[in-house]
């Protein structure tokens, strides 16, 4: 899809929704954390691409995994992290669904490291210490669970719809000034919903 050269109009709704499952420190700290978390899931401009370009924008960058020329680098065989993959025929189309195994990262760079398998087919979390200011995170674990792709193709095997869901649960100890906020638990879910008209 990223190298499609003919005319295609892409509608896109994408972004992250976040929720705090648990944070100590009372409502003032919770409100500060809520303001810091991304909640930017929204409609993006519908763009028409010809030869992979729409003005100065490229189709490759407008689609998931903007940092790569491929939407997926999953190996179809071997240890690829795929929990379930199905192909369902419909009336004039077929739907491919892929659900990934849980992918867990822990350690000092857990919020910026890419999960081994999920990152090969989805955009993933990438937070730096600056993104968390005025907080710092210690003992972090990022658990990608329930990550899912659903793609619909027409009779000419052109993608007509793509839905990507990438939930990640972040647990760790937040520090805020001299206060230690143990066992903080936050869930962020990236959703990307695309339709393609040819």
Image (cartoon, grey):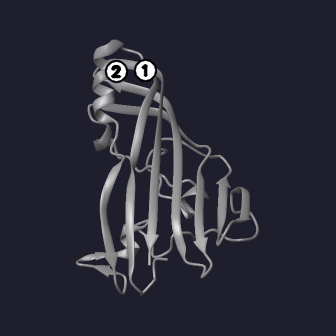
Residue situated in front as seen by the camera: 22 or 97? 97
Query: Which element type, helix, strand or loop, lies under badge 1?
Result: loop
Point out the residue furthest to the front here.
Answer: 91
Position of the C terminus by quadrant: bottom left
Instruction: Look at the picture and state if 157 lies above or below 66.
Output: below
Query: Residue 23 bears which disc, if any?
Result: 1
Q: Residue 59: which quarter of the image? A: bottom left
| Residue in the image at 56% along x and 53% along y | 115
Q: Is residue 144 left or right of residue 110?
A: right
Residue sitting farthest toward the right: 78
Residue 102 screen position, x and y as percent: 65, 46
**Residue at image coords 60%, 82%:** 156
Which numbered marker is on residue 129? none
- Quadrant of residue 145 in the image? top right
Badges 2 and 1: C-beta atoms under 8 Å apart?
yes
Vertical position of residue 12 compared to residue 38: above or below: below
* Disc 2 target residue: 30
Above or below, 187 relative to 96: above
Quarter of the image where one finds residue 72: bottom right
- Alpha carbon separation for disc pair 2 and 1: 7 Å
- Closest to the observer, 87 or 106: 87
Q: Earlier in the sequence, mark 2 or mark 1?
A: 1
Residue 88 visible at all: yes
* Crowdedness near tag 2: few (<14), some (14–19) or many (≥20) residues, C-alpha within 10 Å: some
* Label 2 residue SS: helix
Judging depth in this view, the residue of 139 and 166 nearest the camera is 166
Q: Position of residue 169 (x, y in %)?
A: 53, 37
């Amino acid at each position: 899809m990223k190298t499609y050269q003919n005319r295609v109009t892409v509608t896109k709704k994408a972004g992250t929704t976040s929720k705090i499952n648990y944070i100590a420190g009372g409502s003032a700290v919770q409100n500060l954390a809520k303001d810091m978390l991304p909640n930017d899931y929204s409609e993006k401009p519908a763009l028409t691409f010809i030869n992979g370009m729409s003005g100065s924008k490229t189709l490759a960058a407008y689609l998931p995994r903007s940092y790569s020329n491929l939407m997926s680098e999953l190996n179809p065989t071997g240890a690829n992290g795929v929990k379930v993959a199905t192909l369902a025929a419909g009336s004039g189309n077929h739907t491919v669904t892929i659900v990934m195994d849980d992918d867990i990262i822990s350690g000092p760079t857990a919020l910026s490291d890419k999960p081994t398998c999920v990152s090969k087919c989805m955009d993933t979390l990438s937070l730096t210490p600056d993104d968390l200011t005025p907080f710092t995170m210690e003992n972090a674990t990022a658990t990608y669970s329930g990550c899912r792709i659903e793609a619909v193709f027409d009779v000419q095997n052109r993608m007509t719809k793509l839905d990507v869901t990438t939930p990640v649960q972040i647990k760790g100890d937040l520090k805020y000034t001299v206060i230690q906020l143990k066992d903080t638990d936050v869930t962020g879910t990236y959703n990307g919903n695309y339709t393609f008209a040819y």
